């Protein structure tokens, strides 16, 4: 059966049921259980501790989303121990059975998709379209990875034996052991899903450590996996501060999505003790190039969405815009007009495009970057104001011009809605500037010239590339369509999430050969 992406909102629109989509989402918003206490999940135990932390929604900081257990490391060690013990039998489970459990889990996610989307909106402030898109992405990972496992028959392949007649040889991909899954706030369901499922489907056991800003989505995922039949010892959930993780790396592998600095620090400590696998996605400083041969209307729409969707809080968000000199002024005028009409506010409202950034620290980061930009000669073309920073965390989408290219900010990941704009004369110059960073996650170009597009694809240093993408110039990768992962400091394994090789990140090869008597 062919793989088909979920695309909930688009399907409702195509079936002339858009109002039904909104009714379902708003009903889900009203049904979200606020203020609930969530336990740590280790094996069959649901554990509550004396030490706890409270999670508020960035939409309205007077609203408590949930109360969570604050582990000091002891429960994480216990969860790792339980998961390692469970690996002794889970590693030999039939891949067909694991696929069947995944199908049961995804059916439950699909049944509860609006509930999960509403939780995401409350957790990190995504508007309903982005929140539902994230649930769709999680569903896509389930459907795509199970298909990959089925297509490859569990990654068991009979090899050719041409030299010795009386031998039978196989290549068998085998799991490593217990993995620690460290997930981010920006895609608390989808990214947690791709890393967790990648490990579980391939016969590894996991301990899930969610972002402290968004721990509910991960809790829901783990609960759904357990309900579907994944043994509780195989998939565990612990809430612990990220600063404590480095002291508790007694696992066989870890998967991490987050900042380059934290990822590199964890990796160095991890492999210095002994060589072990890691799956890392470490952000980007993504560029969009607009040439004079672009459809400017398409380019502005795509760049706007790529830069400011979810407030630039995506690893793939456009952070730099390079515009050819002949259309530079016109493009900036159009982009400025687009930004000035942005609906900023409560993401629970259907017409809101941009909700809050994730927390107070993000607001401070936004303000500090703007101060540094202006101190170095950069100018604010549009935006640059904090709208609210107490009850909510609302800031304006911002475009910066005239920042000297010598500034280190051209190479710094912002993760807030600020983009830098610069003109170029020739495409070769734009490509050179786009590549002039340590990152290499995503990149986009707008041009109606096929030769320019081909030159871009052949010379850009990024793992995910787009030409003329109106839905987001550097964002919106879909599992099974655009495998998502970075080059250079943006990634590590070279096997992108949502792609045909991702599951191999969690496996190692074993050659098996049997010799038999000739009859």
Image (cartoon, grey):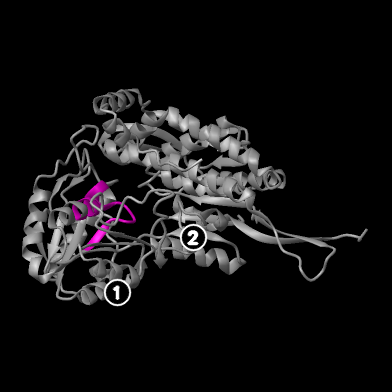
| Number of callouts | 2
Residue at 64% in and 41% down: 96
| Separation of marks 1 and 2 at Cα, in angstroms | 23 Å
For residue 280, the mark is none
Image quadrant where one finds the C terminus? bottom right
The disc at residue 436 is 1
Whether residue 48 is visible here, answered yes or no, is: no
Residue 148, horizontal then vertical, whole percent: 54, 48
Image height of 183 relative to 430, above or below: above
Q: Element under label 2?
A: loop
In the image, taking residue 214 as reference, residue 378 lies left or right, namely left
Residue 444 occupies quadrant: bottom left
Q: Residue at x 71, y 61 (%)?
A: 159
**Which sits in the foreground, 58 or 169?**
169
Drawn side of residue 87 relative to residue 221, left or right: right
Residue 291 in the figure: left or right of residue 91? left
Place of residue 163 in the rendered image (x, y in percent of width and height, measured from the top left): 79, 71
Image quadrant of residue 276? bottom right
Q: Position of residue 403 (x, y in %)?
A: 14, 70
- Image point (36%, 66%), residue name: 462
The residue range painted magenta reads: 303-320
**Residue at the spot of label 2:** 495
Q: Nearer the viewer, residue 210 or 142?
A: 142
Q: Is residue 323 magenta?
A: no
Q: Is residue 147 visible?
A: yes
User: Which mark is first along the chain, 2 or 1?
Assistant: 1
Helix, strand or loop at mark 1: loop
Image spot of residue 40 (x, y percent): 53, 37
Instruction: Tell me the crowding category of disc 1: few under 14, some 14 to 19, or many 20 or more residues within 10 angstroms, Cα based.
Output: some
- As for residue 316 lying within the magenta part, the answer is yes
């Amino acid at each position: 059966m062919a793989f088909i992406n979920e695309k909930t909102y688009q399907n409702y629109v195509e079936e002339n049921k858009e109002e039904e989509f909104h009714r379902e989402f708003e009903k889900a918003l009203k049904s979200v259980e606020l203020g609930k206490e969530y336990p740590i999940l280790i094996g069959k135990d649901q554990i509550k501790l004396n030490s706890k932390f409270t999670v508020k929604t960035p939409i309205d900081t007077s609203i408590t989303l949930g109360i969570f257990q604050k582990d000091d490391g002891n429960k994480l060690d216990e969860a790792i121990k339980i998961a390692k013990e469970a690996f002794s039998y889970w590693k030999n489970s039939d891949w067909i059975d694991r696929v069947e459990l995944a199908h049961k889990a995804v059916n439950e996610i699909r049944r509860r998709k609006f509930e999960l989307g509403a939780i995401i909106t409350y957790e990190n402030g995504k508007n309903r379209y982005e929140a539902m898109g994230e649930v769709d992405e999680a569903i896509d990972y389930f459907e795509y990875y199970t298909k990959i496992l089925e297509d490859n028959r569990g990654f068991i392949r009979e090899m050719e034996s041409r030299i010795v007649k009386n031998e039978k040889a196989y290549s068998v991909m085998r799991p490593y052991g217990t993995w620690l899954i460290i997930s981010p706030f920006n895609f608390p369901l989808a990214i947690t899903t791709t890393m967790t499922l990648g490990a579980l489907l391939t016969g590894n056991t996991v301990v899930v450590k969610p972002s402290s800003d968004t721990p509910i989505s991960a809790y829901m995922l783990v609960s759904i996996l357990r309900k579907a039949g994944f043994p509780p010892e195989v998939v565990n959930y612990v809430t612990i501060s990220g600063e404590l993780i480095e002291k508790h790396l007694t696992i066989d592998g870890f998967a991490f999505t987050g900042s380059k600095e934290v990822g590199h620090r964890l990796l160095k400590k991890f492999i210095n003790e002994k060589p072990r696998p890691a799956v890392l996605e470490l952000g980007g400083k993504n560029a969009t190039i607009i040439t004079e041969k672009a459809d400017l209307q398409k380019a502005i729409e795509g760049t706007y969405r790529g830069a400011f969707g979810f407030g630039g809080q995506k690893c793939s968000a456009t952070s730099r815009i390079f515009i050819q000199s002949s259309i530079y002024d016109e493009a900036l005028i159009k982009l400025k007009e687009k930004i000035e009409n942005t609906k900023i506010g409560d993401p629970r409202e259907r017409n809101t495009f941009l909700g809050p950034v994730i927390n107070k620290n993000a607001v401070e980061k936004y303000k500090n970057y703007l101060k540094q930009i202006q101190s170095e000669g950069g100018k604010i073309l549009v935006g640059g104001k904090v709208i609210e920073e107490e009850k909510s965390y609302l800031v304006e989408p911002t475009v910066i011009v005239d920042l000297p290219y010598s500034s280190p900010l051209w190479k710094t990941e912002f993760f807030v809605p600020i983009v830098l704009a610069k003109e170029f004369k020739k495409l070769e110059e734009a490509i050179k500037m786009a590549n002039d960073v340590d990152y290499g996650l995503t990149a986009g170009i707008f041009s109606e010239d096929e030769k320019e597009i081909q030159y871009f694809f052949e010379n850009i240093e990024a793992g995910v590339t787009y030409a003329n993408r109106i839905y987001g110039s550097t964002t919106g990768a879909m599992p099974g369509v655009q495998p998502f992962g970075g080059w250079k400091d943006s990634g590590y394994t070279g096997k992108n999430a949502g792609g045909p090789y991702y599951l191999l990140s969690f496996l190692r090869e074993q050659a098996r050969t049997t010799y038999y008597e000739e009859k």
